[in-house]
Structures are given as structure tokens and as C-alpha cells.
Image (cartoon, rainbow, N blue to C red):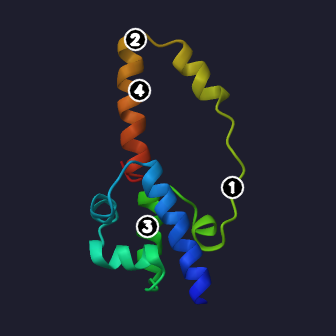
């Protein structure tokens, strides 16, 4: 992998971490890797193992293909979820939002 490819990959990871509203330290903890090491990955000065790539993919909720190559997956159809949410009470919507937030931050919940 070239230096520019590592920099581009780090940029994609940094953008997603920002979208999730997490600091580097918080994200590294979520991915179960060192914060300093994760910082090096984000700036493109360090390579990572397959195991680390998988951890980062799960924590960031990004596909391996997108992290490595910048190719996006096809967007999913939100209609089935919206239909379910449309039948919820206000209390159920608040709970569903909390569950979804947890799910998006931790793929293994």
C-alpha cells in the first residue's frame, strides 16, 4: 500500500469518526486498539493488520472495501424500518432511537 493510499484511507476513517461524534481516544477504545496507534492510522503513517482492519470496520460501521478503496456500498432501502417506526408510540420511538445509536456504535451488540 502506498503512502497516499494510507493517507486516503485515514481520511475516510477520520470523516466517519467525526460523523459518529467521537474523539480519537473514544473511537480507539471502541475498536479496542491503542489511541496513539489509531492516530497514526488516521494520518497515514502506520499500516494495520487484518485483525485491526476488521476491528476498525466494525467500530466505524464501514465496509472493508470502503475503508481500503473508498468504494461505497449500495444504499439500503429505509422503507421497512420507517414503516415499523411509523407504528410506534412516542416512548417506543425514544427507545428505538437509543437502541439504534448503540447498534451503530457497536456492531456486536
Q: Which mark is residue 90?
A: 2
Earlier-in-chain disc, 3 versus 4: 3
SS state under label 3: helix
SS state under label 1: loop
Earlier-in-chain disc, 1 versus 4: 1
Earlier-in-chain disc, 1 versus 2: 1
Question: Which residue, given by chain and number where applicable, does mark 1 sit on?
Answer: 73
Report whether 38 appears left or right of 78.
left
The residue located at (49%, 64%) in the rendering is: 13
Earlier-in-chain disc, 4 versus 2: 2
Q: Which mark is residue 45?
A: none
Q: CA distance from mark 3 to mark 4?
A: 25 Å
Q: CA distance from mark 3 to mark 1?
A: 17 Å
Q: CA distance from mark 1 to mark 2?
A: 32 Å
Q: CA distance from mark 1 to mark 4?
A: 25 Å
Q: Which mark is residue 56?
A: 3
Amino acid at each position: 500500500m502506498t503512502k497516499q493510499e494510507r493517507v486516503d484511507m485515514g481520511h475516510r476513517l477520520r470523516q466517519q469518526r467525526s460523523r459518529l461524534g467521537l474523539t480519537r481516544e473514544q473511537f480507539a477504545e471502541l475498536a479496542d486498539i491503542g489511541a496513539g496507534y489509531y492516530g497514526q492510522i488516521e494520518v497515514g503513517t502506520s499500516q494495520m493488520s487484518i485483525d485491526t482492519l476488521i476491528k476498525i470496520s466494525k467500530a466505524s460501521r464501514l465496509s472493508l472495501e470502503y475503508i481500503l478503496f473508498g468504494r461505497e456500498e449500495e444504499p439500503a432501502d429505509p422503507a421497512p424500518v420507517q414503516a415499523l417506526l411509523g407504528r410506534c408510540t412516542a416512548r417506543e420511538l425514544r427507545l428505538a432511537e437509543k437502541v439504534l445509536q448503540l447498534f451503530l456504535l457497536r456492531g456486536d451488540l
